[in-house]
Image: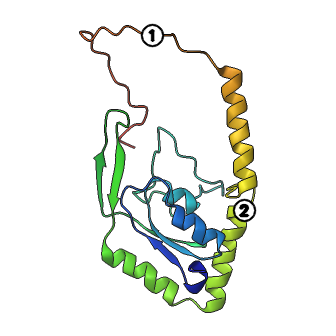
Amino acid sequence: MLYNSTDAQILLTSNEDWGLSLTEAILSGKPIIANVTGGMQDQMRFEFEDGTWIDFDSEFPSNHRGSIKKHGKWAFPVYPSSRTIVGSPPTPYIWDDTCRPEDAAEQIKAIYNLTPEEKKERGLAGREWAIGEEAGFTGEHQGKRVIEAFDELFSTWKPREKYELINTNEVKDRVINHKLLY
């Protein structure tokens, strides 16, 4: 009911791993305004020149620099003006991307200036993508993916040793699988 009473959903968190309220808004057929960071950029469907959905990897872990501009018509991205890195031993780094309020205001104004028909068309385009095969933001799609993940896990399962002796005098190099320069 709340999403249906709005024109759009805005989420400008700085180091968000997904941003579920964006998914809910897209599934409700609403455009989104979001900071380009973490999983929020996945929901904006940034795409390569050939039209394929961006696939982040160690060579290109984030689009927060705005290298790729083309995105789903339901998305109104806000590119960060400040980027830092935070982290911990289990998670070596997480991008902390902060946007300027003026940039967010521009996207709010862009949606405000759309006609009701344009807002509806853009929102429904996002919904169709979200419930389709590519994004698969439905219970059925997610259930299939969980089953596939369990099948892969069980086919490659190797039990751990009952115990492991660790020589604390040895220092092992930590390897970060993402290039921080790209």
What is the crowding at mark 1: few (fewer than 14 residues within 10 Å), some, or many (at least 20)?
Answer: few
Please state the total of marks drawn on the protein image. Answer: 2
Give above or below for 154 relative to 2. Answer: above
Q: Which residue is mark 1?
A: 163
Give above or below for 139 relative to 163. Answer: below
Image-based side of 88 in relation to 130, left or right: left
Which of the 4 image quarters holds residue 91? top left
Which of the 4 image quarters holds residue 121? bottom right
Is any part of residue 142 visible from this angle?
yes
Q: Quadrant of the N terminus?
A: bottom right
Residue at the image point whose x is 51% and y is 10% from the top:
161
Q: Position of residue 36 (x, y in %)?
A: 44, 61
What is the crowding at mark 2: few (fewer than 14 residues within 10 Å), some, or many (at least 20)?
Answer: some
Where disc 2 sits, the SS reads helix
Residue at the image point whose x is 61% and y is 57% from the top:
49
Front disc: 1 or 2: 1
Image-based side of 165 in relation to 5, left or right: left
Where disc 1 sits, the SS reads loop
Residue furthest out toward the front: 162
Q: Quadrant of the C terminus?
A: top left
Tag 1: amino acid: Tyr
Q: Which residue is mark 2?
A: 131
Residue at the image point whose x is 27% and y is 10% from the top:
170
Tag 2: amino acid: Ile
Q: Position of residue 96 (x, y in %)?
A: 33, 54
Q: Position of residue 115 (x, y in %)?
A: 60, 92
Q: Position of residue 95 (x, y in %)?
A: 36, 50
